Image (cartoon, grey):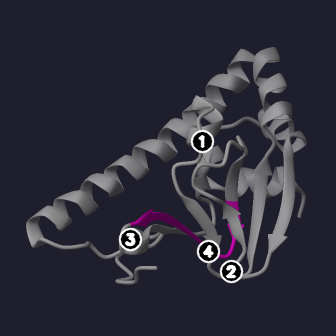
Amino acid sequence: MTSQTLLGRLEPFAHLTESQLGLLASAVEKRDLPAGTMILKEGDSTEEAFVVAGGRVRIQRQTPYGAYALAVLGAGELFGETAFVDRHGRSGDAVAESATELLVLRPAALGILMEKDQRFAIAMYWAFWKSLARKLRRTNDLLAQFLSQGGPAPVPSSSGTSSGKTA
């Protein structure tokens, strides 16, 4: 399956036209990772955004009590888009929980395409905004649960259900 076909099947990019999917595919690199691979480290200054094409990725933050899993992402979910948008260091770690296939959105290539085509740029920022809004809602739910129970909330899986696991 080509990157363009795969991207077109993923929810974050469902609103892109065939032409825009072609542009996006030209800025994407496929990467297969074994379970346990550290994809991102909190504080890194990298700017790539990632799409989980297959497998599962755990997003976690270091706390005084060790690593705390914030989410487990599955196929079709974006991560790393915050650093692409704001150009600041990574706000957490990302670890492949299982054998994982990623689509890496290369920032230099994607930035050039977005500068050349405003409609494409808007479509990409729309995908990032939807992903970030979904994550903000999950975080609000976790915080509300934490505050109401006086302890850590279970980690939501990519389907929005709780897995009950922490890292």
> In percent of the image, x 33 and y 55: which residue is there?
139
Q: Is residue 49 above or below residue 66?
A: above
**In the rendered structure, which amino acid carries the disc numbered 3?**
Pro
> In percent of the image, x 62 and y 60: which residue is there?
76
- In contact (CB < 8 Å): disc 4 and disc 3: no
**Which label belongs to residue 36?**
2
What distance separates the C-alpha of mark 1 from that of mark 3?
24 Å
**Which label belongs to residue 156?**
3
- In contact (CB < 8 Å): disc 2 and disc 3: no
Q: Nearer the viewer, mark 1 or mark 4?
A: 1
Q: Earlier in the sequence, mark 2 or mark 4?
A: 2
Residue 20: quarter of image = top right
What distance separates the C-alpha of mark 1 from that of mark 4?
23 Å
**In the rendered structure, which amino acid carries the disc numbered 1?**
Gly
**In the rendered structure, which amino acid carries the disc numbered 4?**
Arg
Q: Is residue 19 above or below residue 158?
A: above
